[in-house]
Amino acid sequence: MKITYIFALILLVSTLIMAADETEEKKDTLWTPKGVIGLNLSQVSFQNWSQGGENSIAFTFLSNFRINYIGEPWKWRNSLKFSYGRTKLGSEQFKTNDNEIFFESTLIYQIGWNISPYGGITARTAVSKGFNYDQEPALQIVDFFDPFYLTEGVGFAYDRIENFTTRIGIGFKQTFADKFNSKYTDDPETPNEIESFKNETGIESVTEYKIQFLDNMTFYTYLRLFGRFEDISVWDVRWDNIIVAKINDYFNVNINVLLIYDADETLRTQLKEALQLGISYTLF
């Protein structure tokens, strides 16, 4: 089953690449591609340093690809976010500090109203092995496509304001797991069986907004909510906030604050904050 998901991801990426190639050949196309890759680095080294300290190195590789079709009556928006990073302190081994692939595709049919019907999917998984470093030795808790989260949604979307979209509808969330099924997909009410698949139905809401507030600074926020019908008082939350200060065509400073709450993963609110100086390059 994991091979099927890998093939599906390759097919999606290939579709984006082929659409981007067609955009280069046909200048009057309604396809608009955008691709940015970046590398954030941090390094400290000491030698005969009397004030104390440890050598350290950290890096994060990230990429953000978008390809949108804006026509009449259809709009089709696709995005793929990839981030992976590692940190090494002193004589310790490298530790993973960022580890995610996030894909989203939304198809909107414009009917002349202020709101339009939509259908969409999101997919999320880890890039590689991830560990809980609070334990000794470190405990592996995720791997590529283990777990794998897939969500489909249908409902209505509003996108009449520039750089602002919001949508709400019925959501269907599936969680797949293999080695770590006991943590992410197992039903505690069936003690004699360990499930590797879980399906949930509820309400999906997604809002995103981007604004340039200085000549060289932009702010982007993405808020995704999912509430299960079986317990509508508990909501999954993904709130991603990024401020980018552009120094020149290749260097920028960015602040990223990502808040996640997913009761399937942990009952605690997850928070990641990163302040980084990075190198970025716009592919198209």
Image: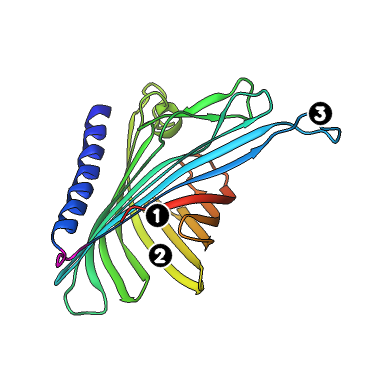
Is residue 260 in sight in this rendering? yes
- The answer to whether the residue labelled 2 contacts the one labelled 3, judged by CB atoms less than 8 Å apart, is no
Is residue 1 in sight in this rendering? no
Where does label 1 land, which residue?
226
Q: SS class of the residue under badge 1?
A: strand
Q: Is residue 29 magenta?
A: yes
Q: Specify the label residue 48 is tagged with.
A: 3
| Residue ID at (49%, 66%) | 219
Badge 3: how crowded within 10 Å, few (<14), some, or many (20+)?
A: few
The kind of residue tagged 1 is Phe
Foreground tag (1 vs 3): 3
Q: Specify the label residue 205 is tagged with.
A: none
Badge 2: how crowded within 10 Å, few (<14), some, or many (20+)?
A: some
Where does label 2 land, which residue?
208
The kind of residue tagged 3 is Asn
Q: CA distance from mark 1 to mark 2?
A: 15 Å
| Residue ID at (41%, 36%) | 126
Residue 70: percent from left, percent from top = 21, 67
Residue 110: percent from left, percent from top = 18, 72
112 is higher (above) or lower (below) than 97: below
The answer to which image quadrant residue 159 occupies is bottom left
